[in-house]
Amino acid sequence: MKVIEVANQIEGGQVAFDLLKEKLEQGAKTLGLATGSSPLEFYKLIRESDLDFSDMVSVNLDEYVGLTGEDPQSYRYFMQENLFNEKPFKVSYLPKGNEDTAEEETAHYNEILAQNPVDLQILGIGRNGHIGFNEPGTPFDSQTHLVHLDQSTIEANARFFEKIEDVPTQAISMGIANILDAKSIILFAYGESKAQAIAGMVNGPKTESLPASALQAHPDVVIIADQAALSLL
């Protein structure tokens, strides 16, 4: 793992953007994308750039179950607003969070990932060490699956909803094995609340109780984080 300390999210976005351009020059064709606040500056720089993704594919990590793509809290809506409307890809895949077909969608999404190997995967990290929506206890060999979200994850995401009762309790997420299949990974972490997870990911034992520790086995991971997130290293 390579750790790059940055002053803030603006600098972190620039560092990631420069790494993205390097990967594109090396022939990257498929990007694995994440939602949440951590990659917002990165996406902003992409929107303002002259990069052309019209011949590229994107695959997203996850999606809530029970929200349509038109719901402002869905991850499809997030991606449209923060990236796709201004920088469309040839095709952009996200899991479909229909409650009635969620189990079938996991198998379908695994097929999509097999057909579109990820060159560069963008990640955030949860306070409990989750990556994607892979909560503590998720097997390292997991494929795309239906997730019952931890209470800590629901509470962390409640800030995006009118009330905590509105936060979905399930999601479809790439599995840890899917994430590890990416050729390269960039992980963003900002703030003191992420410090314990980052310390465990980098220096702790490789354990399913901290899903992000699986990244220790990956040959090309770059962690972009501020001083607060790195404070326990």
Image (spheres, rainbow, N blue to C red):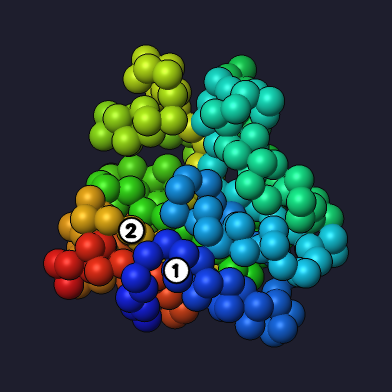
Q: Left or right of 24: which side holds 133?
A: left
Q: Position of residue 220 (x, y in %)?
A: 47, 78
The residues tagged by marks 2 and 1 sit, at their Cα atoms, a distance apart of 9 Å
Query: Three-letter amino acid code at disc 2?
Result: Tyr
Q: Looking at the image, which residue is at 85% across and 64% down?
A: 55
Query: Looking at the image, do the residues carrying marks 2 and 1 touch, with CB atoms under 8 Å apart?
Result: yes
Type of the residue with mark 1: Gly
**Which residue is under mark 1?**
12
Write the residue at 36% across / 28% down.
Answer: 158
Residue 184 in view of the camera: no
Query: Element at badge 1?
Result: helix
- Residue 40 in percent (x, y) is at 53, 53
Residue drawn at (45%, 48%) of the image: 37
Seen in the image, is 200 located left or right of residue 71?
Answer: left
Determine which quarter of the picture holds residue 67.
Answer: top right
SS label for mark 2: loop
**Rendered residue at 55%/20% (across/down):** 66
Residue labelled with disc 2:
190
